[in-house]
Amino acid sequence: MRLFVAVIPPSSALAELADAAAQLRGFPDAGRLRWAAPDTWHFTLAFLGEVDEGLLPELTERLGRAAHRHPAHEVRLARGGRFGDRVLWAGAEGDVGTLGGLAASAAAGARRTGIGVDESRPFHAHLTLARATGRLSLRPYAEALADFRGTPFRVGRLELVRSRLPGSGTPGERPRYETVESWPLRT
C-alpha cells in the first residue's frame, strides 16, 4: 500500500485558504494547472511510498511513539510560494520547528521499520495547491498569496495516510486519501 505520514489542518483553516486561493483560478492560464482539492490538502511529514502490509504493526507502533514525543503546537497557514515553476504551495508560520521535529521523528520511525524514506530535501512545511502541466510562470500565483495569513490552529494529531492512485484512466481523476491510523501529540 502507498503511504505517507501527515498533519491535516482543521477544515476551518482549509476553508480560509480555499477562499484566498479561489481568486487564483481566474488568472490567465489557470486552467493549465492541476489544482488539488482542499479536502486533500495536508502537510506531508514523510513520504513512505509502497509499504508491505506486514510492516504496518511495527510502523504504527513507532509512529505512535513519535507522536507522543512531540507536543501539540500552534501554526497557521500563511503566504504562498512555489518550487520553481512546477508546484504552487501555501506555507506555514508559528511553531514550524516542532512540526519539523515531528517530520524527522516520523521519517526515523519509518527507517527503523525498514522503509526507505527520501530525505534528499529538507522538510519544508507546505500544502500543495497546484502543479503546472507545462511551461507556466507560477510567480504571479505565489505573489497573490504573499499577504495571506490564516487563523492559528492547534496541531494535535499525527496521521498515517493511504494514497490510492487513480486507476480508471478518467481525465482529471485524482488520488484518494484515507487515514489508516492517527495518534495524538503530547499535551
Image (cartoon, grey):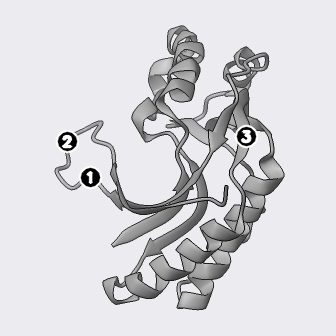
The residue nearer to you, when weighing 94 against 132, is 94
Q: Is residue 96 left or right of residue 2?
A: right
The residue under the point 61% across, 66% down is: 67
The part of the image, by quadrant, that contains residue 112 is bottom right
Q: Are marks 1 and 2 in contact (CB under 8 Å)?
A: yes
Q: Is residue 120 left or right of residue 17?
A: right
The residue under the point 27% across, 41% down is: 173
- The outermost residue toward the left is 168
Amino acid tagged 3: Glu
The residue under the point 71% across, 25% down is: 142
Q: CA distance from mark 2 to mark 3?
A: 39 Å
Counting from the top left corner in percent of width and height, residue 170 is at 19, 42
Question: Crowding near pointer 1: few (<14 within 10 Å), some, many (20+)?
Answer: few
The residue under the point 57% across, 40% down is: 128
Name the residue carrying label 1: 166
Amino acid tagged 2: Thr
Judged from the image, the secondary structure of the residue bearing numbered disc 2 is loop
- The outermost residue toward the front is 187
Q: Is residue 108 left or right of residue 48?
A: right
The residue nearer to you, when weighing 112 against 81, is 112
Q: Are marks 1 and 3 in contact (CB under 8 Å)?
A: no
Sequence-wise, the earlier of marks 2 and 3 is: 3
Counting from the top left corner in percent of width and height, residue 35 is at 46, 31
Residue 37 visible in the picture:
no
